[in-house]
Image (cartoon, rainbow, N blue to C red):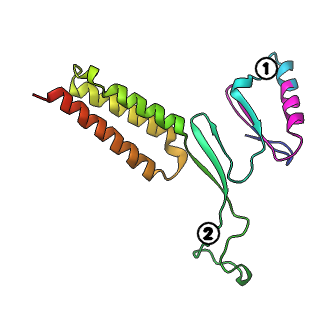
Amino acid sequence: VYGIKNNGWVVRYGDNIIIISNSKLIYKIELSINEFLKKRGLNVLREKSRKFKWTIDKKFDFLGWTFHFVKSIKKNWMITEPKKTDGQLNNYFKLYVYPSRESISRLKKIVKDLTSISRTGVSVFKEISDLNFLVKSWSAYYEPGGKQSVLRSGLDYYIWKRTKKFLYNKFKK
């Protein structure tokens, strides 16, 4: 993440580039990045790059994550503020980061494929091993996202339901 003299941010991961700016200089920033990369024999891939004005309550997806910028209007009784604000946090902005809908649906599709009827010939130990690897790797990637107990409990229920159906189909008489 690179700041650009109070005019915006450039986020780069590999060949994915996002330019976030609330000023009218967003096209100037894009041109300077293109010139910088052309000097080095590189170019920006349009399908993997985005530029936009990031305002309050706007979301964007990047590398399987959803970034959601909100302004809090809740009163926080745990923080002592001067009496003029009555405990209300003014100008309190928060960034929520959580797995995107596409990545959750992709995980559900993989779990569905792993627990499908066509895999009833696979041993139970292999099935559990495959599911454990999937859940551990997915959780490790999305672990920095903060409190995700509701999401994880929903995914746990989905995996449990699919595993139960798989075992029923495997051992039914």
Element assignment for label 1: loop
Quadrant assignment for the C terminus:
top left
Q: Is residue 4 above or below residue 48?
A: below
Q: Is residue 156 above or below residue 17?
A: below
Element assignment for label 2: loop
Q: Which amino acid does label 1 sit on?
A: Asn
Q: Does the magenta stretch include residue 27?
A: yes
- The location of residue 106, given as percent across then percent down, is 47, 31
Residue assigned mark 2: 74
Determine the image quadrant of residue 32.
top right
Per the rendered image, the range of residues in magenta is 11-34
Q: Residue at x 21, y 23 (%)?
A: 123
* Closer to the eye: label 2 or 1: 2
Residue assigned mark 1: 43
Residue sitting farthest toward the top: 41
* For the residues bearing labels 2 and 1, Cβ distance under 8 angstroms: no
- The location of residue 170, given as percent across then percent down, is 18, 27
Q: Residue at x 21, y 32 (%)?
A: 167
In the rendered view, does 164 fall on the left or right side of 22? left
Name which of mark 2 and mark 1 comes first in the sequence: 1
Q: Which amino acid does label 2 sit on?
A: Lys
| Disc on res. 111 | none
In the rendered view, does 145 fall on the left or right side of 12? left
